[in-house]
């Protein structure tokens, strides 16, 4: 029989839902400055989207090669959707593996130069899958700026996590030097950093890893498809593909669709297939996305002009920002972040750009360290010179109004 408590004893002292009230979001929304969850109503193409009934220039997308709207991806996706259905209703390990997944895995592994690959449902899940590699006797040496998905993976894993300052090889060397030689060492980094758009110091990491017998795990979410002569990513760009032991990729950026993969030695991928919880306990990548990713891979292999187009837009954007005084704008990739500092000013910057017809991203703490709120801009292969110039004109107007150009 259920025991009935006096009412006062039943009532929780603290409401666990108190944390769900977000006064800052309300304040920002009422000032017209809330920058998140803005619904896109249409994608007319040519680097533009419709929001609030208005066509604006998309300057915050990761579709660097402009493939999300490519007719070949859409046709491949539609064909697979009609032939195989809208979902797989199960995980890879049980009923959810498609022949298409296996084809994609084979082609991806060959493309990236690894023995094997495992396709999962998102890039986030690919990174989470790595947690199975982070055992209790291992030490993980991670760049301070790695993506949240890699941090979550480290939390889910059992290894000790040590973080070195962004791209600081001296600190990484010291940490590796001081590490217990009996422990397994893994260096974890992004190839191209998602927010700053800068590259990891892979030559430095490769040298230290070789000296200390550490494994190198690289998240190529932003650089696979984009960097290197063949589009194989940051490792190819540095001529260091053989220095990377395990690599993760996402299909939500250069591949223009959804999905992710882990690539590496055959025995490691086989092990992950049987122990990575994010793959074992979640439904597999739907047919349409799998077929679209295969079509994208084909385009990535055969159309290097797309990489040239986005890099040329990126260089125009960077040079224009430097001319405006944003001298810290990193070079060489389609993503640039403008350090603003204070979160309210960053939201005003974002809202001002939108008023000027440019949709950018705003990054606030905890996505970035406190006091380092920023605007993230990115260009794609679809952006014309005229469109890049429109972004620059909008940045100049809004940053000028906010008094940011003096200390850019
Ligand atoms: N890694 C990095 C560096 C990312 O930026 C992202 C997505 N923003 C992911 C992984 C996760 O990819 P997905 O969106 O496919 O889950």
Image (spheres, grey):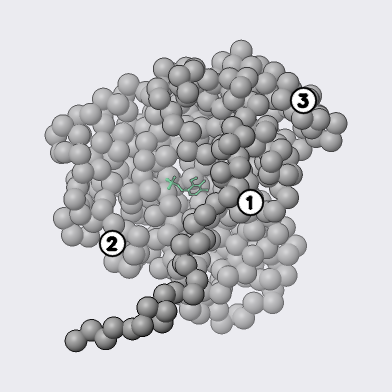
123 to 356, vertically: above or below: below
Give yes or no for contact between labels 3 and 2 (Cβ–Cβ under 8 Å).
Answer: no
Question: Label 2 CB, ligand 1: below 8 Å?
Answer: no
246 to 100, vertically: above or below: below
Q: Residue at x 49, y 45 (%)?
A: 221
- Is residue 151 shown to the viewer in this render? yes
Q: Secondary structure at mark 3?
A: helix
Report which residue position mark 3 lands on. Answer: 401
3D distance between C-alphas at marks 3 and 2:
50 Å
Q: Residue at x 40, y 41 (%)?
A: 251
Which numbered tag is attached to residue 408?
A: none
Which numbered tag is attached to residue 365?
A: 1
Q: Does residue 49 appear to the left or right of 235 in the view shown?
A: left
* Along the line of sight, the residue nearer the viewer: 225 or 23: 23
Report which residue position mark 2 lands on. Answer: 281
Q: Position of residue 139 (x, y in %)?
A: 56, 73
- The 10 Å Cα crowd at callout 2, few under 14, some 14 to 19, many 20 or more, is few
- In primary-sequence order, the first of circles 2 and 1 is 2
Q: Position of residue 241 (x, y in %)?
A: 52, 49
């Amino acid at each position: 029989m259920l025991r009935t408590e006096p009412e006062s004893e039943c009532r929780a002292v603290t409401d666990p839902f108190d944390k769900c009230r977000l006064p800052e979001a309300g304040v920002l929304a009422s000032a017209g400055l809330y920058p998140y969850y803005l619904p896109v109503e249409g994608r007319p193409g040519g680097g533009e989207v419709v929001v609030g009934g208005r066509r604006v220039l998309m300057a915050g997308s990761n579709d660097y090669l402009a493939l999300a709207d490519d007719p070949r991806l859409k046709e491949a996706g539609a064909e697979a959707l009609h032939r195989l259905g809208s979902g797989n209703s199960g995980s890879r390990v049980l009923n959810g593996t498609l022949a298409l997944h296996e084809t994609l895995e084979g082609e991806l592994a060959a493309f990236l130069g690894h023995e094997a690959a495992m396709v999962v449902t998102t890039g986030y899940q690919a990174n989470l899958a790595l947690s199975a590699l982070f055992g209790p006797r291992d030490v993980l040496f991670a760049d301070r700026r790695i993506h949240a998905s890699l941090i979550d993976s480290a939390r889910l894993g059992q290894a000790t996590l040590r973080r070195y300052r962004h791209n600081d090889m001296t600190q990484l060397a010291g940490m590796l030097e001081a590490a217990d030689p009996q422990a397994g060492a893994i260096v974890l980094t992004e190839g191209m950093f998602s927010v700053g758009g800068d590259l990891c110091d892979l030559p430095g990491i490769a040298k230290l890893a070789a000296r200390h017998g550490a494994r190198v795990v690289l998240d190529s979410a932003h650089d696979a498809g984009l960097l290197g002569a063949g589009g194989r990513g940051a490792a190819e760009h540095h001529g260091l593909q053989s220095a990377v032991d395990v690599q993760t990729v996402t299909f939500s950026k250069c591949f223009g669709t959804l999905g992710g993969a882990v690539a590496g030695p055959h025995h490691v991928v086989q092990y992950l297939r049987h122990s990575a919880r994010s793959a074992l306990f979640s439904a597999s990548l739907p047919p349409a996305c799998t077929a679209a990713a295969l079509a994208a891979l084909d385009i990535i292999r055969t159309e290097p002009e797309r990489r040239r187009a986005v890099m040329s837009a990126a260089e125009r954007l960077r040079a224009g920002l430097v001319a405006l005084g944003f001298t810290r704008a990193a070079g060489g990739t389609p993503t640039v972040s403008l350090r603003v500092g204070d979160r309210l000013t960053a939201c005003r910057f974002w809202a001002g750009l939108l008023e000027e017809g440019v949709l950018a991203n705003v990054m606030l703490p905890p996505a970035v360290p406190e006091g380092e709120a920023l605007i993230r801009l990115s260009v794609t292969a679809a952006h014309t010179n005229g469109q890049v110039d429109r972004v620059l004109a909008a940045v100049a107007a809004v940053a000028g109004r906010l008094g940011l150009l003096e200390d850019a």
